[in-house]
Image (spheres, rainbow, N blue to C red):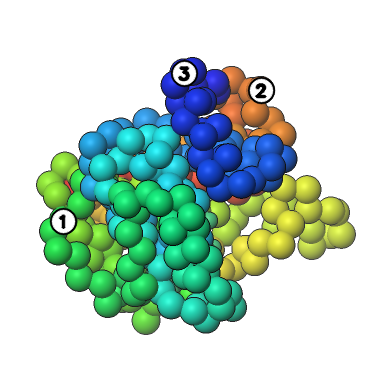
Amino acid sequence: MRPDPETRRREEALRRALDLTPDRWAPVRHRAREVFDGLDVRGRRVLDVGAGIGTYALYLTRVLGAREVVALEPSAGVGGHDDITDRMRRRLAAIDDHRVTLVEQTFQRYTPDAPFDAVVLLNSINHLHETRAALPDDPAATAAFRAVFARLRDGLLPGGALLINELDRRCLERYTSRVGLPRLFTRGIAYDLHQAPGTWADLAREAGFGDMHIRGVTPRRLARLPRAIGRHRLIAFATNAMFVLRATRR
Ligand SMILES: C[S@@+](CC[C@H](N)C(=O)[O-])C[C@H]1O[C@@H](n2cnc3c(N)ncnc32)[C@H](O)[C@@H]1O
């Protein structure tokens, strides 16, 4: 998938602003193109939950034209990273993009001034209440995530978009690695800290989301595959286990 020349120009400008080498930028760009494809944020307000060091929040403003992104990232120490918010703060200061605002807060404690047009959670939903169990088997975690989805709904305007990018706990390498085969696409992933996409879809539906779509994320090594094949869920199962769930607040 090759975007139009203006988008590519903006991507290149962001790469330079972030001072990333083309090699380090390529996987970020591939993921952003794949994950955000079809999400129209031009002129919109977006909440990025668990924004990390802010790379994708900046992509949303500087490449995709979002008017404002609240980058929600809890303060030091969550998930074993102790300098995430400092790194984001330094980045935002260097890049001077006033459209991205860091809010150092957990999603559970954050109260927005006004509902958003879109909420994105990139590799963060499972961290909001970590469990190794498949959700229906952990009633406390299920209750915690019901509350999370109710907050996601309340944080969006009617018709607003929810986008979740996550890993599926069920994937081929989870099973093949048990018999000693190497992990080519999912190295380092703790499968059981993730859920199946259908689990998130059920929670979203229960909270009042509709228009649900789940698709895979083409692995970068297979980027030349036609989109319909690269994003097929069977390809995701056989490779990187990544999916995107899109839903709309009713
Ligand atoms: C795996 S990182 C993903 C970072 C970024 N979104 C990305 O895709 O590169 C997960 C992020 O979620 C954040 N996080 C953990 N618990 C959170 C919570 N309760 N509320 C908001 N963010 C949280 C972590 O601090 C971490 O930065």
Visible residue check, residue 165:
no
Within 10 Å of disc 2 (Cα), the crowding (few <14, some 14-19, many 20+) is few
Q: Residue at x 49, y 79 (%)?
A: 76
Corner quadrant of residue 161: top left
Image-based side of 233 in relation to 6, left or right? right
Look at discs 3 and 1 and give the one toward the viewer.
Answer: 3
Q: Residue at x 59, y 68 (%)?
A: 192
- Tell me how far mark 2 sits from mark 3, CA to CA: 17 Å
Q: Amino acid at mark 1?
A: Pro
- Tell me how far mark 3 sits from mark 1, CA to CA: 31 Å
Q: Secondary structure at mark 2?
A: loop
Look at discs 1 and 2 and give the one toward the viewer.
Answer: 1
Q: Residue at x 59, y 20 (%)?
A: 226
| Residue under pointer 1 | 115
Does residue 118 sit above or below 147 in this rendering?
above
Visible residue check, residue 29:
yes
Q: Secondary structure at mark 1?
A: loop
Image-based side of 16 in relation to 149, left or right? right
The image position of residue 238, as x and y in percent, is 67, 42
Q: Amino acid at mark 3?
A: Asp
The image position of residue 66, as x and y in percent, is 30, 41
Does residue 232 sit above or below 24 in this rendering?
above
The image position of residue 223, as x and y in percent, is 65, 28
Image-based side of 54 in relation to 200, left or right? right
Q: Residue 4: which numbered mark, if any?
A: 3
Q: Earlier in the sequence, mark 3 or mark 1?
A: 3
Q: Quadrant of the N terminus?
A: top right
Q: Earlier in the sequence, mark 2 or mark 3?
A: 3
Q: Is mark 2 within 8 Å of ligand 1?
A: no
Corner quadrant of residue 211: top left
| Residue under pointer 2 | 224
Question: Is 83 or 105 nearer to us in this picture?
Answer: 83
